[in-house]
């Protein structure tokens, strides 16, 4: 079970995520149970070897998982943690350099910069400012 605190229009809400299956999330909002349907399937992922991708070396820093597809030479940058996208700094077609800031993710009450591990061209931006994401969601795809 994962717990989040949301602040909406000045009111604080405690949300416990109990179960996620496809597009249905079972949660408790301030102790009241709900079944919520989201607009896209929430994928559960297995833990894989993460790649550190933070602006400052910090103990227990969040990690970004990178999957490479040899067929298309595209690199998918996935969310290291569940959280909220605070800002998106790139658009489809942008050329990025290794280490360039792509997104700002708020997770566990901390702001985390998600940076490019490789130089390339942005092929997909799968999130928008304000999106709530789950661990393992693909955020950006970078091609050669």
Image (cartoon, rainbow, N blue to C red):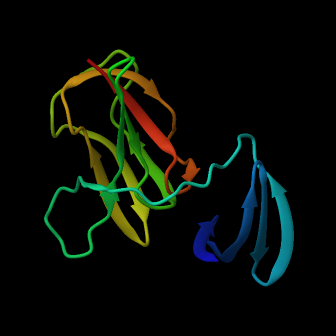
Q: Residue furthest front?
A: 70
Vertically, is 71 above or below 128?
A: above
Q: Report the front residue among 3 and 130.
A: 3
Q: Determine which quarter of the picture holds residue 103.
A: top left
Q: Residue furthest bottom?
A: 31
| Residue 36: x %, y % from top left | 82, 58
| Residue 95: x %, y % from top left | 24, 19
Residue at 76% over, 70% down:
27
| Residue 74: x %, y % from top left | 35, 24
Q: In this view, does 55 lie to the left or right of 36?
A: left
Residue at 71% over, 40% down:
40
Q: Determine which quarter of the picture holds residue 110.
A: bottom left
Q: Report the front residue among 73 and 125.
A: 73
| Residue 111: x %, y % from top left | 34, 62
Is the N terminus in the top left, top right, bottom left or bottom right quadrant? bottom right
Vertically, is 64 above or below 144?
A: below
Q: Determine which quarter of the picture holds residue 8.
A: bottom right
Is the C terminus in the top left, top right, bottom left or bottom right quadrant? top left
- The number of callouts visible is 0
Vertically, is 2 above or below 41?
A: below
Q: In this view, does 72 lie to the left or right of 131?
A: left
Residue at 85% over, 76% down:
33
Q: In this view, does 65 lie to the left or right of 17?
A: left
Vertically, is 102 above or below 56?
A: above
């Amino acid at each position: 079970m994962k717990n989040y605190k949301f602040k909406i229009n000045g009111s604080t809400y405690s949300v416990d995520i109990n179960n996620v299956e496809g597009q249905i999330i079972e949660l408790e909002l301030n102790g009241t149970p709900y079944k919520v349907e989201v607009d896209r399937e929430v994928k559960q992922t297995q833990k894989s070897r993460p790649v550190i991708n933070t602006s400052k070396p910090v103990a227990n820093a969040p990690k970004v998982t990178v999957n490479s597809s040899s067929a298309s030479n595209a690199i998918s940058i996935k969310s290291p943690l569940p959280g909220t996208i605070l800002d998106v700094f790139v658009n489809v077609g942008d050329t990025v350099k290794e280490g360039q800031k792509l997104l700002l993710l708020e997770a566990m009450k901390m702001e985390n910069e998600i940076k490019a591990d490789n130089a390339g061209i942005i092929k997909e931006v799968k999130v928008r400012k304000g999106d709530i994401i789950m661990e393992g969601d693909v955020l950006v795809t970078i091609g050669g």
